[in-house]
Amino acid sequence: MWQQISLLVTLLIGLSSKVRSDFISLKSIPSPPSGQDITNKVFKTGQNIDILPAAYGDFNGDKLTDIVTIDNNRTTVTIYLASKEVPYMKLGPSWNFTEHQEHDSKFEKINSVTMGDFTGDGLIDLMITTSARVNITQNFSISCHNLSHIEDNPVDTNATLHFTYKVPAIELIFCIGNGKSINCSNHEKSKPLVQEPLIVDLNRDMILDLVGEIWGMENNNTKTNYTIDNKTYMCAPNPMLVKVKAVWLSEEGRPAAKYKEGIFDGKRSTDHLNFPMSHPSSNAYVDIDGDFIPELILITNQSQTESHANFSREIYSVIYDSSSSNLSLHVKSPRKPILLKNETVEILGQPLFIDLERNSNLVHIIPFCAKKDCSTKWGILVDDKSGEFHKIELGPINFGGNEWRIIEPIHFQDTINPQIEINFINQPASQPGQQDQLMNMTVNGNFESQTQNFYSRSIVMQAGDYNLDGYPDLLVVLESKLKAEILKKAVIFENVPCNTEGFNLGCPFTRTFEPNFKFLQEYENVTFASFFDLKENGILDVLIVQESVDQKHPDVKNPNYIVRAFETSSNADSYFIKALVLSGRPCSQCLEKDVPYGNLIPGALVGYTMKDVEGQTQTSIATQGYRSGYTTLDVPYTIFGIGHSPNFVDHFHFYLGYCFSLTSNQSFSHDSRQIIPNSQIYAIPSYPILQDSHETTMTWRVKLFLTPGDAVLQTFGVLIGIIALVAALASGLEYKEKRSDRKERMAEARRFLM
């Protein structure tokens, strides 16, 4: 009997699977996503006005993503804490810098905010960048020759040159968080930077470090004329303003405490091995060669003039020897120029590293403009994994009778006139002199006096799988300049198969991008747009910043900026896996003890392998926290769309790697199997990494949270129905067998009596 029941169960399950598979196959024909505005559910009335989203992260460790905003004056930072109940964003801690005396004399305007653990306590802190002007001063010993009249001073003289440049710079303020509030006072002042730094973890302590540039001066061999007391002197050598690459290592309780320079191959920015970073910077910390160990990616500009750009990519291995606490950065591959045949590229934006073709290969993508005003060709440069970049041209685009282009980045330049004072040896001190025109320098500035420039300091594209088809899409703000006004809209560029009849002809990859103006067409005057999972349901929604413009009634007082929330919905039930790798540092003050939710490790990798409804292998990979600065507003998690099949994810992978020496490196991985779709999975590597003379080991903890979709519930319903049916059949068969046994016993009893 049980063999019959087993056979029946197998047939029923097979039949249900076939029906379910056919049903899903019909549903897997994707329909375009739609959505609706839910601003009134996300923000309390009036709390979405005159704020600018600046960073996303889980500040209080409750597994919900919070929003860090700054006010319209860019002097106050406020954290909106996420909630599962309406309104989804509630006012949290804030800090007004103008109300604190320690910042009155030097505080300018907030440029950007970055969230992370800069103190090693497992809790989220804030790093705030501000604009400033700083003096770069140095004394030089020089030799001078009087060119005016030989009889006045026939002998060459030695002199001391006191040289000062006043340059634009970035200053850092660290706001220490405890999960409930922030404290931005009593911070240690770091060296001023040339531009906003990249956030990394270089020395494996799971405390965030910085990579950037500082201003410096050094001698060169040129001869320069100085006019002093109506006399002209030719002097050498002379100082030159340079940019010096450097890193800042954080310690427990001390953000960016240790400053180190000279650890790059090539010590000076003027060295042929080491050119200054592009401005704005386009750097990243990511595994670019497939060994699961992140490298430091720098985009440099070899050009010494501002009229022409000459970009290159440098790749460094980050090597840290824990036994000697020695950190070094070594060139991993030769510098590769970023060139296009017979074309120039004047502007590069913030980098993207995405699995463009869903084949578990991360590709390096850089937004570009052929001209500085982005009026002609613009799009993305895509690395083909050999170091050669190929162009995918996205614009200009004609839509609705208008020509649309990417918004031109605000380009700041300052012409710096150095202040000099020359003191001749054995002569009375001279008055400050004047240098010739050659000593003036043009440098990039960092001053944004107007709020609208907050999101326009670099080209920023957002990447995310908004339709959950498994391929990452792009979110971009475009503008159309008319005679009377400027139109601005948020546009989705969908990742679609490349063909000869599509939007982008002759694309060099199997996938390309096509614009979708309709998805967010209801929003006008868009200043910025970014992906965000508003309901923590694994679907990427959109947060939009609108500029309030009233052309007809300019005298009416309106808010300058309004934040809108757009919820993405799909007609078909889509499936996802939401993943992130957390820091392993202990967190005694976290909401859930020893689990620092929201505290990410930059450069960690996540990926999956599974079978789709047609039995084909589906695989993808992504990286987290690989870029920072310039208000990139990346979400602190990875969402993989896995299509419209509720099949279990066979393998989900986590990777974290380090270099211990030039010849020794190791990647640590963890493989979770049979993951239910619509799950949120957290991986927590151990800290510290156990290292001895023989091997290095790392243990992992994994926490899984399930958010079932409709089809998953339907699948469970089918399984429960099958179980109930089998139980009923088994009960019926058992009852029938008992009746038959009873009749047989009664018949035997009669025969015995007779």
Image (cartoon, rainbow, N blue to C red):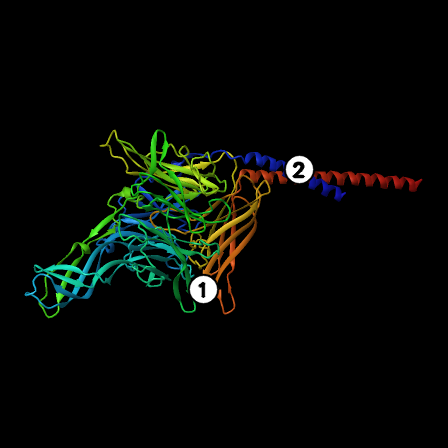
**Residue 125 figure quarter:** bottom left
Q: Which residue is mark 2?
A: 15
Q: Quadrant of the C terminus?
A: top right
Residue 597 on image: x %, y %: 44, 52
Q: Nearer the viewer, mark 1 or mark 2?
A: 1
Front in this rendered view, residue 283 or 172: 283
Q: Is residue 294 above or below residue 724?
A: below
* Dot 1 crowding, Cα within 10 Å, few <14, some 14–19, many 20+: some
Q: Alpha-carbon distance for marks 1 and 2?
A: 55 Å
Front in this rendered view, residue 228 or 105: 228
Q: Dot 2 lies on which element?
A: helix
Front in this rendered view, residue 212 or 336: 336
* x 41%, y 43%: residue: 532
> Can I make out residue 229 in this image?
yes
Judged from this view, the residue extending furthest toward the right is 754
Q: Is residue 713 above or below residue 653?
A: above
Q: Which residue is mark 1?
A: 660
Looking at the picture, which amino acid does disc 2 mark? Leu
